[in-house]
Amino acid sequence: MKIVNYPHPALRYPARPVTTIDAKLQKLAAEMLALMYEHKGLGLAAPQVAHPYQMFVVNISGDPEKKENELVLINPVILDRQGVMEGEEGCLSFPGLFTKIRRAKSVKMQGYNLKGELLEIDAVELLSRCLQHELDHLPGVLFVDKMGPIAKLAARTSLREFERLYEKARGKGEIPADAEIKKQLDELALLA
Ligand code: CO
């Protein structure tokens, strides 16, 4: 399993709600956390590892030793959002790209953990930003979709470069054709 980069189609494939929390899902969450730490991220959503499931992992400390900050959320929804904040944001599917994104300052989010318990989380500042970013991944929304016009212009070259690298990798046979990826995603989606 690895993190897919923009413009991999898995990032745009709408994730399905999880219907069973089993050993397979627990293994997926554990692998996602390991990848997130390895790549120095604060959050990772299942579509970023080409698994179309409504699940993400977060640890705003970015520190694998700080398990108390680890959060796995399954089928998450936002119940409330308040205020506005602007700040730098990155994404493990866009390595090296950081851009200013406007988000709600605080959110109330609900979702299940790996034990199947319903959690309600009140988040502010960095955790709020992280949760909103990861939640967006589930229906296939990316942080670059949320950039203002100036940030969009500034990121244009960088996005083209990601697209060029993706095409190059596909040309070398490192990435399957879109139709093949879509088929794999459809098959995984049925197992949600
Ligand atoms: Co992201």
Image (cartoon, rainbow, N blue to C red):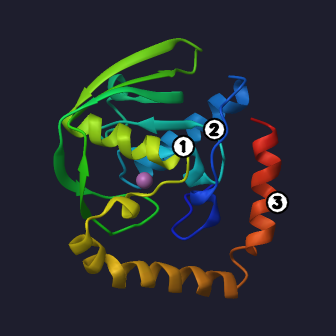
Q: Which comes sooner in the sequence, label 3 or label 2?
A: 2
Which disc, if any, is residue 94?
Answer: none
- Toward the viewer: 169 or 128? 128
Q: Amino acid at mark 2?
A: Leu
Q: Identify whether 131 is placed above or below 178.
A: above
Q: Which comes sooner in the sequence, label 1 or label 3?
A: 1
Percent across and percent down for residue 23 are 71, 25
Percent across and percent down for residue 158 are 36, 80
Image point (69%, 74%), residue name: 175
Residue bearing mark 3: 183
Residue 3 appearing in the image: yes
Residue bearing mark 2: 28
Could you tell me how far apart the alpha carbons at marks 1 and 2 are, in whole angstroms?
6 Å
From the image, state whether disc 1 or disc 3 is nearer to you.
3
Could you tell me how far apart the alpha carbons at marks 3 and 2 are, in whole angstroms?
20 Å
Where disc 3 sits, the SS reads helix
Image point (52%, 86%), residue name: 164
Percent across and percent down for residue 14 are 63, 49
- Toward the viewer: 82 or 94? 82
Percent across and percent down for residue 181 are 75, 64
